[in-house]
Amino acid sequence: MGWRWRRRWPAAAGVAACIGLGLITLMREGEAVPEAPQAPPAAPIAAARTVTAPPENRAARRRQLVEQVRLTDHTYCSYLAHSRYPHESRPAGHHPDQLYPNQPLLETNPMRAEGGDSHPEVQLQTAQSRVYLAAGEQADFSLRALDGGGQPQPLVVTRALAQGMTYGQSRPAPQVAVPFADEGAAWRGTLAPAQTALAGFHGTIRLEVRYQAGGREGVVLFDVIYSPQSPASWSGRPREAVDGGALQFALPLDVRLPGRYVVTGRVDDAAGRPFALATFNEVLGQGAQQVRLQVHGKLLHDGAPRLPLLLRDVEGYLLRENLDPDRLLLPRLEGKVFASRTRSLDGVPDTEWQSEERSRYLAEYAKDRAAARTRLARFDPQAAMPPADCGIGRMDQ
């Protein structure tokens, strides 16, 4: 099975750029239509007649110009809204798939045989505790069979082998047996690479489980990505401060391998509601360093969370560009990491995030919007402009 690699939250310019593709196409099409249809050359006659555009052509042209105004306005306002917080401090609702990284992965699929044939009359339910394993961590797996009506079916695991995935001329990794046991509701097994012959393997480890259910033999595959080496270790108590227009959580990190570190933490409000996703993405040198996860002041004022905030479930890695695997995992900080002592927003700025990139994009989108409105006004001076789309008062935009 394939796994999506988590990347840094893309610049909001990328969101607006996707919208802009349609804008560019539409504007180019608009430029191909003359603002006033021209009459074809006429043979010399005593008196030239005035030629006017057919009403249906003028109506189509006006609809096109109105659509350009709406699209340029939407592009400008969307970027304005999505970029008012920095990339490293985003509303939790923007990344629902990253809020609970330690929840097991649950799937239900038709039973599959080794040759690829499926048997939909038997449904296989599987669970996997985690995909990424830092040094010393383990992953738990389970499977059970159901009939078409959702009732449990007898299932027996006959063999389970784990092996590191290698490619090309790489030396094959060893295979290790993974014991599974019948626990009544399901068969369960645990893979702890550090305790096996795979202790030094770095990359994807595939677990192949063979079983019998519904009178047939089936196979299911699980993948984990294992880092046998920790590039750094957490080295002290976190602390908080209001700095740089944000509430910051500083986590001490003892760096053994310098490079670019990407760290992500989840921030809940006092009621346990996910509020923000905080990301750190910077180059760190060797030795004692600080990972600063921030909740931007504007985000705090807009979202008005119940204080104090709770930092939880921190995970990260050292990025290894142009290498495979492309990361060395940090030990994860699972569950509660730090409870903020900040009880009010006094002293926390309520200002939008600013950067050279944001200003540049806003200026370009504003020029596009003004040009579209000018074209419509020249074509039809009596036209009412479509209403502006910049209602940015909500966190979910």
Image (spheres, helix red, strand yellow):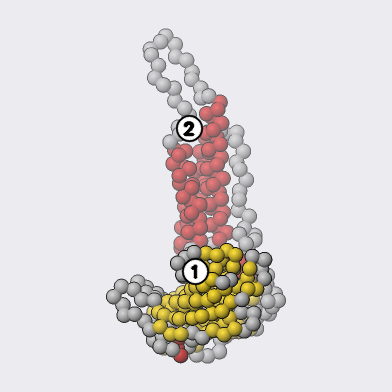
Q: Quadrant of residue 352?
A: bottom right
Residue extending furthest toward the left: 169
In the depicted structure, whether residue 277 falls above or below residue 391: below
Res 97 visible: no
In the depicted structure, whether residue 166 falls above or below residue 115: below
Q: Residue at x 48, y 18 (%)?
A: 50
Tag 1 secondary structure = loop
Residue assigned mark 2:
35
Report whether 380 appears left or right of 344. left
Report whether 245 appears left or right of 163. right
Relative image position of residue 26 (x, y in whole percent): 48, 43
Residue assigned mark 1:
113
- Of residue 122 and residue 317, the one placed in the foreground of this image is 122
Q: Residue at x 64, y 60 (%)?
A: 393
- Of residue 168 and residue 50, the one placed in the foreground of this image is 168
Q: Quadrant of residue 313?
A: bottom right
Tag 2 secondary structure = loop
Report whether 125 appears left or right of 44. right
Q: In front: mark 2 or mark 1?
A: 1
In the depicted structure, whether residue 170 falls above or below residue 392: below
Relative image position of residue 174 (x, y in whole percent): 38, 84
Q: Residue at x 45, y 44 (%)?
A: 25
| Quadrant (top left/top right/bottom left/bottom right) for the C terminus | bottom right
Q: Are marks 2 and 1 in contact (CB under 8 Å)?
A: no
Relative image position of residue 236 (x, y in whole percent): 52, 90
Q: CA distance from mark 2 to mark 1?
A: 65 Å
User: Disc 1 residue type?
Assistant: Ala
In the depicted structure, whether residue 1 falls above or below residue 292: above
